[in-house]
Amino acid sequence: MTRRLADLHYDSMTPAQREVHDAIASGPRKGVRGPLAVWLNRPELARNAQALGQYCRYDSSLPPRLSELAILTLARLWSAEYEWYAHKPIALRAGVAQAVVDAIRDGAPPPFVQRDEAVIHAFLSALHRERKIPDALYAEAVEELGEAGVIDLVGLAGYYTLISMTINVFEVLPPEGVAYEMIPQGTS
């Protein structure tokens, strides 16, 4: 799974690691993969991060179409191939258009039809590029998503940035045999 850390095997886990593993595996994720497997090396980090992830992914005010679009946008901004692999099919099932997914993957301007999707993509792109949000874009995001939606979007951005950093630092890769889709940013 990862090149920089050995996989943890259930039989050799500490009681704290097993407790967190079982909590994650019995929840909506149905398993411990990717960055969660990395975090399991530090069970308290895994416990707390997965709780934040549970909220951001399943319990926030953003509908799945928008949260999955946000996750793909962040995966692309960070060139986090594992995250792309894991969330592309979910985003498509949630209603993100194939043409939008392809454009994000390719680093091209997405052909948004829905304004809320365009706002989320612009918001996250600006946040990543400028490390802040201009007043006009903030106002547009609040108008489109509401204050709760903007707060949840920022929380999701923070969580999936942590996910992406974990993926990139520990070289978490998609399973063997899965073709890579994204070209790392800055290359052609």
Image: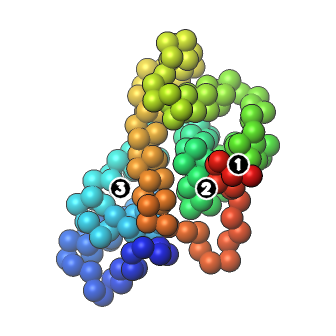
Q: In the image, is 45 to the left or to the right of 104?
A: left
Q: Earlier in the sequence, mark 1 or mark 2?
A: 2
CA separation in Å, label 3 and label 1: 26 Å
- The residue sitting at 78% across, 33% down in the picture is 111
Location of residue 44 in the rendering, given as x and y in whole percent from the top left corner? 23, 60
Rate crowding at label 3 as few (under 14), some (14 to 19) or many (20 or more) other CA atoms within 10 Å. many
The answer, for residue 101, to whether it is visible in the render is no
Residue on which the image places disc 2? 84
Q: Secondary structure at mark 2?
A: helix
Rate crowding at label 2 as few (under 14), some (14 to 19) or many (20 or more) other CA atoms within 10 Å. many
Q: Earlier in the sequence, mark 3 or mark 2?
A: 3
Whether residues under marks 1 and 2 lie with C-beta atoms below 8 angstroms apart, the answer is: yes
Q: How is the image coloured?
A: rainbow
Residue at the farthest front position: 187
Location of residue 89 in the rendering, given as x and y in whole percent from the top left corner? 66, 56
Q: Which mark is residue 105?
A: 1
User: From the viewer's perspective, is residue 57 above or below residue 124?
Assistant: below
- The residue sitting at 68% across, 77% down in the picture is 177
Q: Secondary structure at mark 3?
A: helix
User: From the viewer's perspective, is residue 33 above or below residue 104?
Assistant: below
Q: Amino acid at mark 3?
A: Gln
- The residue sitting at 33% across, 53% down in the picture is 49
Mark nearest the camera among 3 and 1 is: 1
CA separation in Å, label 1 and label 2: 9 Å
Q: Which mark is residue 50?
A: 3
